[in-house]
Every structure is written in C-alpha cells, then in structure tokens.
C-alpha cells in the first residue's frame, strides 16, 4: 500500500466525510423511468393492509413532563400527563363534569386537576371519563384508539427495531393537508431524493425495490438505497433500507456505512378534518442516531446541543416532502371528485 493510500485509509476510520466533486443539479441522471408508479402503489397497498393494533403516535416522549399536554388524533381531543411514577396517562381532553379543557389544568403528584372546579383524575376510570391505553417507548408517546382504528387491538404498538446504545434522538413534527397514506407513499419513492432534496442527498442509487403485486416475501418487501448524505461540500456515503412495519409507519435504517444501525422512523398520524373539510395529518419523525466510533459517546453527552440540529434537518426535509404528500392527496381528491361527478 502506498503512503497516500495508507493515509486515506487511516483518515476514513477517524473522519467519515469525503469531499464531494462539484455537481450541477440538471446534470443528474433522470430517475423517472425507474420510479415505477405500479411498484410504489403495490408497496403502499401492502403497507396499508398490515395490522396496527389501533396504535397512534401523538407526541415526542420528552414533550410530556410536568404539565398536561393537549393533542388531537382522528378528531378526538386528548390530554396526556405523567403519573407520580413517571408513567404515561392519556384520556379524553374534556372534563366529564362540564367539559373544561383538561390540558389547561395542573398536575399535582401525578394527579390531573381540572382548572374549573378541581375535579381530580388519577388516570383510572371515572364516571363519564375513561382513559385510553398508552405506551411510552422512550422516544415517542402512543395512544390506542379502538373506536378509530377498528382493528383487533394489541397490548403494544408495532415498534421498529432501534439501535443499541450509545445513541441519541430527536423528534420533529409538521402538519399537512393530506392523509397518512400520502406520507407513507412519499417515502416509498426513494428515487426523488437527490432531485427533490439536492441540499441533503447526492449520488443516490436505488439498488433494489420490491416487485409489484400482493405476494411478496418479507425479506424482499423493502427499498434498498445507496446514497450520500450531503453536508455542504462534504458527504457521508451509506446504504439504507426502507420498510413499513404497519400502515402509518415507515422506517429508514442504515445497514452499511457510517452510523450503521441508525434509524429514521416516520409516523403519519391522522388529525381529523380542517375547517375546509379536508384531512390533516401530522408527520412525527424520530431520528435515532448511533455510531460505533469511540467519539460518538462524547457526542451523546452533548445531545442537548446536537438534537436541535438533527430536528432542524428533519424539519427542512419534511417541509419539502409534505408539499409532495399534499400534492399526491390533491390529485387523488380531484380524481375522486371527477369520478363522483361522472357517476362512476
């Protein structure tokens, strides 16, 4: 091995970045012939047919602390708070007495106190008020709404595999005018990555995609992508897989390259209809970073400083991708209206 090659080898073990050559956005290889609508739609339909156990992500776990938190899922107003032991409680957001907004109350030693007349809720059943099953996975807060999901309920949500410690995470949220399936469909089109997000991705190549059709084995039902994450003129090449374990979740996992094992969980939660009668969906994305590099332990100690940077990066991507998802919904909605008008 030459001295230069040896230096490069040593550098790659301590410095994961590579200098990217100058590139022009129009000079990229077009991917429209590869991005088969039939493949994307078939993968989406298989995803939508999987059971969810009626579980919905509604907040970042660490956003629920000493105060009650209001949320809405599928038009249902919820209130969440912590019990005295730190356990998660979720229930209807209206007080059973006269309908006060319970999220404006106070939590005292794990008991939620209504601000109107002092009614106390400890998280158990009370006349006119019943809690919902809740789950805190340490990153995200889930609620089970059987009347909404109308599936066979499960004790726990379908949780994606996450990297082992050391790790750190950040959760971003954006709301859009679309349905959850439009969010999932966006992620089932990896071919748009370097075209639509040139500030974040380059040298993207879809190595494998599932076939169109219903009968696809579990190991083949994934998108495998080689891509370089861009940070200015620096890049980090990885291989990632995209899978959908349940109808409202899609997971990107790095399986080779820097940060192997790191995951990005994208959860799509229906909020209900807006004032215009159109559906709203929350995109709640958890970025869970991991690295075997010794220095990553120090980065984890600095998580309070690093997490906001991770959150901003996820938010920037989803500002664009929500426009994509909203466009998918608008076209489908217009098509449904045309079919209705024509009497189909």
Image (cartoon, grey):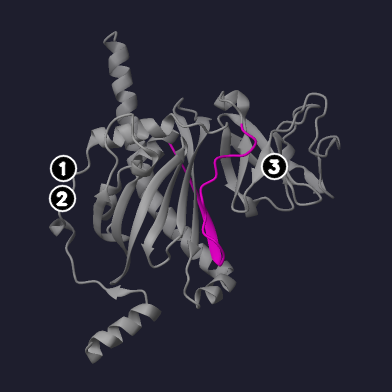
Q: Is residue 273 left or right of residue 339?
A: right
- Residue 10 occupies quadrant: bottom left
- Residue 164 occupies quadrant: bottom right
Is tag 3's residue or tag 1's residue first in the polypeptide sequence? 1
Q: Secondary structure at mark 1?
A: loop
Residue 295: image location, x then y, percent: 50, 78
Q: Secondary structure at mark 2?
A: loop
- Quadrant of the frame with the N terminus: bottom left
Q: Is residue 70 visible?
A: yes
Mark 3 Cα shell of 10 Å, populated few (<14), some (14-19), many (≥20): many
Q: Which residues are magenta?
A: 154-177
Residue 153: image location, x then y, percent: 61, 29
Residue that appears at 81% across and 35% down:
116
Residue that appears at 54% across and 64% down:
167
- Disc nearest the viewer among 1 and 2: 1
- Quadrant of the frame with the C terminus: top left
- Disc nearest the viewer among 3 and 2: 2
Q: Are marks 1 and 2 in contact (CB under 8 Å)?
A: yes
Kindly give the residue lying farthest to the top in the view shown. Answer: 343
Q: Is residue 125 magenta?
A: no
Q: State the separation of the CA atoms marked 1 and 2.
A: 8 Å
> On screen, 42 above or below 59?
above
Q: Which residue is mark 3?
A: 80
Residue 162: image location, x then y, percent: 52, 54
Residue 342: image location, x then y, percent: 26, 10
Which label was assigned to residue 33?
Answer: 1
- Disc nearest the viewer among 3 and 1: 1
Q: State the separation of the CA atoms marked 3 and 1.
A: 47 Å
Q: Is residue 264 left or right of residue 224?
A: right
Mark 2 Cα shell of 10 Å, populated few (<14), some (14-19), many (≥20): few
Q: Which residue is mark 2?
A: 30
Q: State the separation of the CA atoms marked 3 and 2.
A: 47 Å
């Amino acid at each position: 091995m030459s001295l230069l090659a040896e230096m490069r080898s040593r550098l790659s073990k301590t410095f994961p970045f590579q200098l990217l050559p100058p590139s022009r956005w129009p000079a990229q290889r077009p991917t429209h012939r590869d991005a088969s609508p039939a493949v994307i739609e078939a993968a989406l339909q298989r995803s939508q047919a999987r059971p969810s156990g009626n579980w919905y992500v509604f907040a970042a776990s660490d956003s629920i602390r000493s105060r009650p938190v209001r949320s809405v899922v599928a038009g249902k107003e919820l209130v969440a708070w912590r019990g005295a032991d730190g356990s998660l409680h979720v229930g209807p957001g209206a007080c059973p007495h006269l309908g006060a907004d319970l999220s404006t109350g106070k939590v005292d030693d794990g008991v939620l106190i209504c601000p109107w007349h002092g009614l106390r809720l400890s998280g158990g059943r009370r006349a006119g008020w019943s809690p919902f099953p809740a789950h805190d996975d340490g990153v995200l807060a889930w609620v089970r709404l059987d009347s909404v999901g109308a599936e066979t309920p499960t004790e726990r949500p379908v949780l994606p595999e996450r990297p082992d410690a050391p790790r750190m995470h950040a959760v971003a949220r954006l709301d859009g005018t679309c349905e959850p399936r439009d969010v999932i469909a966006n992620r089932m089109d990896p071919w748009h990555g370097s075209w639509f997000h040139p500030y974040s991705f380059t040298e993207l190549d879809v190595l494998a995609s599932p076939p169109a059709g219903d009968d696809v084995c579990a190991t083949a039902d994934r998108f495998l992508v080689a891509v370089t994450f861009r940070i200015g003129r620096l890049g980090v090449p990885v291989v990632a897989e995209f899978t959908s374990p349940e109808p409202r979740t899609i997971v990107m996992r790095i399986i080779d390259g820097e940060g192997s094992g790191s995951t990005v969980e994208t959860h799509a939660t229906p909020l209900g209809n807006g004032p215009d009668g159109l559906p709203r969906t929350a995109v709640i994305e958890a970025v869970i970073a991991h690295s075997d590099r010794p220095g990553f332990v120090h980065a984890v100690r600095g998580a309070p400083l690093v997490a906001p940077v991770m959150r901003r990066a996820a938010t920037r991507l989803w500002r664009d991708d929500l426009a994509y998802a909203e466009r998918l919904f608008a076209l489908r909605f217009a098509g449904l209206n045309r079919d209705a008008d024509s009497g189909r």
